Image: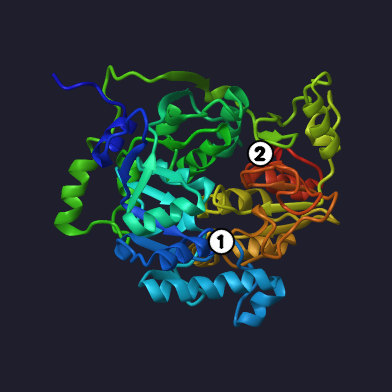
Amino acid sequence: MKSKKTLFEKVWDEHVVVPESADTPAILYIDLHIIHEVTTPQAFSLLREQGLPLRRPDLVLATMDHSTPTTPVASFKDLEIVGDGAAMQVRQMEANCQEFGIELLGFGSAERGIVHVIGPELGATQPGKTIVCGDSHTSTHGAFGALAFGIGTTEVGHVLATQCLLQRKPKTLAINVKGRLGHGVGAKDLVLGIIGKIGVNGGTGHVIEYRGDAIENLGMDARMTVCNMSIEAGARAGLIAPDDTTYEYLKGRPRAPQGKDWDIALKRWQQLYTDEGASFDKSVDIDASKLKPMVTFGTHPGMVVGIDDPVPDHSSDPSFRKALSYMQVEAGKPMTQTSVDVVFLGSCTNSRLSDLQEAARVLQGRRIADGVRMLVVPGSQQIKKAAEDLGLDKVFIEAGAEWREAGCSMCIGMNGDTVGRGKLSVSTSNRNFEGRQGMGARTVLASPMTAAASAIRGTVADPRPFLES
């Protein structure tokens, strides 16, 4: 009798080259390696030093996103405005990809964008694949039923050389989400609510599988938002079983299987689900219908409250007091009393077309508050074009926001897009650590709808009244 397996176990078992032992991790075969300009220079240097060829150039896809400016780039002089480091990284990326025969979606490519946005939109991300990238938020690709790990620079070199990854087998965590999200409550609110419940260490050592009718009712963009932030709960990866929503998204995309190959792939993908009776190491239940728009108040994503709930008081905890002091937030008061300086709509968490549409619904016919700066940064050049075809760029510009080129932008302050010291940003990104968006910057994580409402109000704001009117 066949043993009952979770989705994770099915994908893992299909990719084990050498099983783990008490002394050594497993050797896992990797189907897709996505790379960018920041975590690869040392990896390519390692190959040169060891005289090693690239094992499978056809399974590597490169883009530039982290250190590239989101203002138009016509030459390296435009890059040097951001800083010598950014220009050097881009030059090195171009040279490395040319030397090792890797396809690079560079500045001249209409397909360039954030690494975790372009993989899915091109159809390179597929159910059942193992995917790695030198970036924490590689878990995004798990929305397709792919097992996707963020890896370090040394591991990037290992995968380039061997197409394999050393990895201890994680445990499994089921997060069962029932009910429907309420009006004005989105996927970002859901995942912030999950992290708030289980904590930033709740998934440590585990791969999370998100399950239940609330997850099944999400579109692919929303599923990617949920899986993207799995790492913020400490998890190694996040997974959602593929279904008709997944297949409809992938069908016809340039790097997805075509013709008879599609039919063969579809039959294989339809077996990727957790068997009835399979067991998880841990499980957590969430009622989506009880969630409000969520915002962070501290310096990690687990410090989160409902939009109109008071900031909790844990004054006996020195680290909690330090976080509130840094954020200039007062316990016992809701975040809606907090003034906003900057609003950032973008990142690999919330820069897809549906994210832009949600924010545009709130901003349509309105203006952002005096003194507030708002950046809208699409996740890829394709998303930028699609948004412009729908007239979303005009909605943002007429509201007083800046409409930018694709890139990581203000999620990580290393590309010229930063928040000033002491300024408060409402951001649709994924991390709110001290200085994440710039030295001394304060970050409140929120959904696209909440970000847009906050831009209009000039304080952290509930988006629901704006949607109702």
Q: On screen, 188 above or below 54?
A: above
Q: On screen, 117 above or below 180?
A: below
x and y percent of residue 204 in the render? 52, 29
Is residue 16 shown left or right of residue 103?
A: left
Q: What residue type is labelled 1?
A: Val
What residue is drawn where x is 79% and y is 34%?
Answer: 323
x and y percent of residue 391 in the render? 57, 64
Determine crowd level at label 1: few under 14, some 14-19, many 20+ residues with C-alpha closer than 10 A: many
Q: Nearer the viewer, residue 64 or 385?
A: 64
Asked if the residue at tag 2 contacts the one at tag 1, i.e. Cβ–Cβ closer than 8 Å, the answer is: no
Is residue 139 shown left or right of residue 468?
A: left
Which residue matches tag 2?
468
Residue 134 visible in image: no
What residue is drawn where x is 83% and y is 28%?
Answer: 321
> Residue 261 bears which disc, if any?
none
> Residue 38 bears which disc, if any?
1
Residue 287 visible in image: yes
Q: Nearer the viewer, residue 97 or 110?
A: 97
Q: What element carries label 2?
A: helix
Q: Which amino acid does label 2 sit on?
A: Glu
Q: How far apart are marks 1 and 2 (CA)?
A: 43 Å
Is residue 132 shown left or right of residue 76?
A: left
Precedes in sequence: disc 1 or disc 2: 1
**Picture quadrant where residue 38 is located:** bottom right
